[in-house]
Image: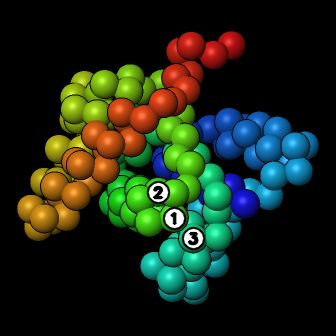
Amino acid sequence: MMFLLVSEERTPVTTLLVISIQLSRQNIQTFVDDQLSRGDEISESLVNAIEASAISVILFSEGYASSRWCLDKLVKILEGKKEYAQIVIPVFYRVDPSDVRNQMGSFGILFSKLEERLKVNTEKLQSWRNALKEAASLSSFHSLNMR
């Protein structure tokens, strides 16, 4: 099974559908993070989906930086990578990997606004920064390099 993590705010539904359809054609079962029921306990449902996945695809977009939910899931995915040797594939959609890695540019501006808005503790903020840096340093795909 493959886990797809996206920020719904700025990622076109068509992009997600194309990825999902292409994977289904290869008989790869996908779990899209929006498949969780609103009544589900996010943490347990998410952990189960991540643990059941051999591969996680993270679709970074500009809006990703403004989603606490996505950042928390990113940390869990990277924990799964370390604990279960899962494959993590970052895809950068209209955002530069170095901006994600260093929280710079428009990605960094949105990340700073999230920090101000939530007044999160420094430990959580640092775990998000570390996860962004680690994920953006992995072998990846960049939308500007694809047709």
Q: Position of residue 105 (x, y in %)?
A: 25, 25
For image coordinates 57% across by 86% down, the residue present is 39
Could you tell me if the residues under marks 3 and 1 are in contact, i.e. CB atoms within 8 Å?
A: yes
**Front in this rendered view, residue 60 or 53:** 53
Q: Quadrant of residue 16?
A: top right
Q: Quadrant of residue 36?
A: bottom right
Residue 51 image label: 3
Q: Position of residue 107 (x, y in %)?
A: 30, 34
Dot 2 corresponds to which residue? 81
**Figure check: 1 above or below 19:** below
Q: Position of residue 74 (x, y in %)?
A: 41, 56
- Marks 2 and 1, how far apart at CA: 6 Å
Could you tell me if the residues under marks 2 and 1 are in contact, i.e. CB atoms within 8 Å?
A: yes
Q: Amino acid at mark 2?
A: Lys
Q: Secondary structure at mark 3?
A: helix
N-terminal of the two: label 3 or label 1?
Answer: 3
**Figure check: 30 above or below 132:** below
Q: Is residue 60 left or right of residue 101?
A: right
**Figure check: 14 above or below 30:** above
- Marks 3 and 2, how far apart at CA: 9 Å
Q: Secondary structure at mark 1?
A: helix
**Front in this rendered view, residue 139 or 62:** 139
The answer to whether any part of residue 39 appears in the image is yes
Q: Amino acid at mark 1?
A: Tyr
Dot 1 corresponds to which residue? 84
Q: Residues within 10 Å of mark 1 (few under 14, many from 20)?
A: some
